[in-house]
Amino acid sequence: AQKITQTQPGMFVQEKEAVTLDCTYDTSDPSYGLFWYKQPSSGEMIFLIYQGSYDQQNATEGRYSLNFQKARKSANLVISASQLGDSAMYFCAMREDRTSYDKVIFGPGTSLSVIP
Amino acid sequence: NAGVMQNPRHLVRRRGQEARLRCSPMKGHSHVYWYRQLPEEGLKFMVYLQKENIIDESGMPKERFSAEFPKEGPSILRIQQVVRGDSAAYFCASSPFGSEQYFGPGTRLTVT
């Protein structure tokens, strides 16, 4: 069964606009962590933001914020004031704490293109 | 503090040859994870190692693939008798206590 779903294979956004990248997840573990990574065309994986399942507030890191809706099992990434350098693949990922191995499960990714 | 290092960054092998991918974790990190990214896909977990121990290899193909993390030196992912389907990006990540993972730049393997 798909653990992480990213329903938007490709997204376009105008420069300086905000964009939301969708992510839903499936777990029965009460303790888990959610991550977003950025992968530019150069290929490296860049950590963006983390949300723990017990965190009361939505995580924010600069222009990135995570819209965490636990009951809906969604963890959407919001990028404010898009920049050309934001064009990249974005991966949502989850770590299920019960395994204690911190194995991270990745979604299929969303390709974001920022239009000048 | 240097990040996770992987080498080579690009590796070309002919079918049937062996590929050896190296990962040097961040200083002080004793947990190493290997992931594979096929073209147009997300990363898939392969194996989790601590020094001298394989903890979870549930994502490793049963044949031709092996991994080690010796007491001294980098972690090695070894692929014997490579086939075209092994062409992918292989990422290594390390963590200090089995928590947050820091990714290396990846090794892009091309099998011709």
Image (cartoon, grey):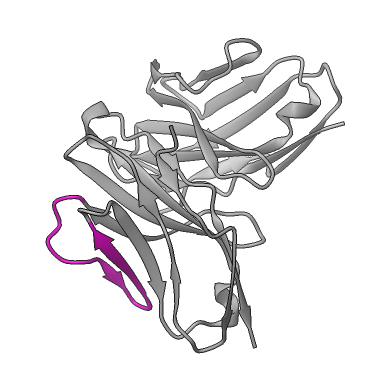
> Is B38 placed above or below A60 here?
above
Instruction: Tell me the residue at 80%/27% (across/down).
Output: B84
* Location of residue B91 in the rendering, given as x and y in whole percent from the top left corner: 55, 40
Q: Position of residue A22 (x, y in %)?
A: 43, 61
Q: Which percent across, then down, holds residue B18?
A: 75, 19
Examine the image and state in which quarter residue B27 appears.
Answer: top left
**Could you say where residue A104 lies in the image, as x and y percent from the top left?**
39, 39
**Position above or below: B84 against A33:** above
Residue segment shown in magenta: A53-69
Q: Nearer the viewer, residue B2 or A33?
A: A33
- Residue at 25% x, 66% y: name it: A59
Q: Nearer the viewer, residue A86 or A70?
A: A70
Where, quadrant-wise, is the N terminus of chain A in this rendering? top left
| B7 with respect to A94 (left or right) | right
Between A20 and B57, the one nearer to me in the picture: A20
Which of the 4 quarters of the picture holds residue B98? top left
Asked if residue B85 is positioned above or below residue B2 in the image, the reply reads above
- A56 inside magenta stretch: yes
- Residue at position x 42%, y 44% in the image: A4
Q: For the C terminus of chain A, which image quadrant?
A: bottom right
| Left or right of A81 on screen, residue A62 | left
Magenta residue check for A60: yes
